[in-house]
Image (cartoon, rainbow, N blue to C red):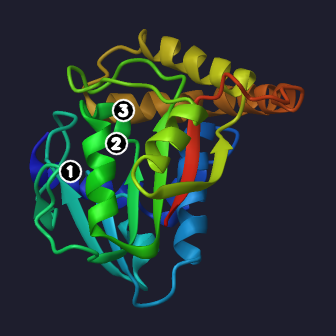
Amino acid sequence: MKPTQRAKLLTIINNPRVQSLIYSRFIDYHQWSLVSFVKEQAGKIKPGDSVLDAGAGELRYKRYFDHCKYTSNDFCVGDDEWYFSAIDIKSTIYDIPVEKESFDHILCTQVLEHLEFPELAFKEFDRILKPGGTLIVTVPLGQGEHQTPHDYYRYTKYALRSLGARNHLALVDIRPQGGIFINIQFITWQAIDMFIPFKKHVAVRYTTYILLMPVKLASGLIFSFLDIFDREKAYTNNYNCVYKKI
């Protein structure tokens, strides 16, 4: 897909009305949880605070930080179709060319699994985050390999707490993204996606997605109900985390 076509598609997908439909709780729980969590955390940030979106990709969360001094960073290696031209700081996450204690907050969503050396990333977060600042992280536990070969780790809540503690970042909030039944739903639709023909053709892909929406909605209602009975959430798909620099 040409960059201009990709940019137009992103404009459509990032429209709030479109997102409220395709990323609703019962149609795509995973994306709904990510967006809801980021929106919630963005709403807690004071106007004018500085925010670094580390591993920002295609800036899907930028609009939630319009009240902040938002800066994006990425190494610009991801899906082949991704559009990186709007990134502010193009660098490795291990060595971001900014001064010490430059940011009040750091956002890092679905990035840690793609880092060969996550410890170095946390050391850099500690360096560039102001005292008392927050690090907002989302990271998978129960997902398959993706963006290969740049896919290295999956994280338990114990690993996430330890990783922060070793780098002056206290884990003050961690939430599982559903439990085993939500994860079963996610894996089921990943399996169905394998059989969709001509997936690389954008029109075909999204037309198929729209046609399958009623089925996804029905399955989402069923699995969300079943997930109520999973109290431990030990087989969660993803963790949403907030750290505070100490």
* Amino acid type, mark 2: Val
Mark 2 lies on a secondary structure that is loop
Q: Position of residue 202 (x, y in %)?
A: 29, 35
Mark 3 lies on a secondary structure that is helix
Q: Position of residue 53 (x, y in %)?
A: 32, 62
Q: Residue furthest right?
A: 229
Residue at image position (52%, 71%) is 42
* Disc ID at residue 224: none
Q: Residue furthest bottom?
A: 48
Residue at image position (29%, 18%) is 198
Q: Which of the 4 quarters of the picture holds residue 148?
A: top left
Mark 1 lies on a secondary structure that is loop
Circles 1 and 3, Cβ within 8 Å, touching? The answer is no
Circles 2 and 1, Cβ within 8 Å, touching? The answer is yes
Judge by depth and name the residue closer to the eye, 47 or 169. 169
Residue at image position (34%, 50%) is 122
- Counting residues from the start of the chain, the first of labels 1 and 3 encountered is 1
State the quadrant of the N terminus: top left
Spatial CA distance of label 1 from label 3 is 13 Å
Residue that numbered label 3 is attached to? 113
Residue at image position (50%, 40%) is 162
* Disc ID at residue 111: 2
Circles 3 and 2, Cβ within 8 Å, touching? The answer is yes
* Amino acid type, mark 1: Ile
Judge by depth and name the residue closer to the eye, 11 or 25. 25
Residue that numbered label 1 is attached to? 93
